[in-house]
Image: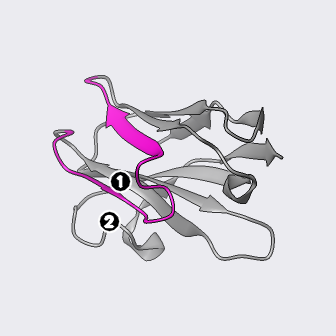
Amino acid sequence: VQLQASGGGPVQAGGSLRLSCAASRGFAVMGWFRQSPGKEREFVAAIDRSGRSTEYADSVKGRCTISRDNYNMVYLQMDSLKPGDTAVYYCAAGITWSGFAEVDHYNYWGQGTLVTVSS
């Protein structure tokens, strides 16, 4: 199983980025997490296989949208970015929806893509 995340980069506060994650096959749940230096990895968003169920961390709700297509691609559209959003963003895949916000719930992880938001 391979997960390939991309789309990170530098952006000014208030700007937007779209992260992409290519999975080698479909999974019951796909999630995005992020990790800043000195902090634990934290949940950002998750989407189920059908795309009908989505969940977001309170810190990004209203600013981020997770979506997926029929070809095992998952996206995270991030708008109104803040310096506090600076982190390495990871996509992850799991075999069940339950526990979608927990790091330990996911079976596979991508390599991460760095998002840097400057003020």
Identify the residue at image location x=44%, y=75%.
104
What stretch of residues is rendered in magenta?
A: 51-70
Does the magenta segment cover residue 53? Answer: yes
Q: Position of residue 91 (x, y in %)?
A: 51, 49
Q: Mark 2 belongs to which amino acid?
A: Phe
Q: Position of residue 92 (x, y in %)?
A: 46, 53
First of labels 2, 1 by sequence position:
1
Does residue 42 appear left or right of residue 53 in this picture? Answer: right
Secondary element type, mark 2: loop
Res. 75 image quadrant: top left
* CB within 8 Å, label 2 to label 1: yes
> Which residue is the site of mark 1?
46
Does residue 30 appear left or right of residue 70 in this picture? Answer: right
> Which residue is the site of mark 2?
100
Res. 7 image quadrant: top right
Q: Residues within 10 Å of mark 2 (few under 14, many from 20)?
A: many
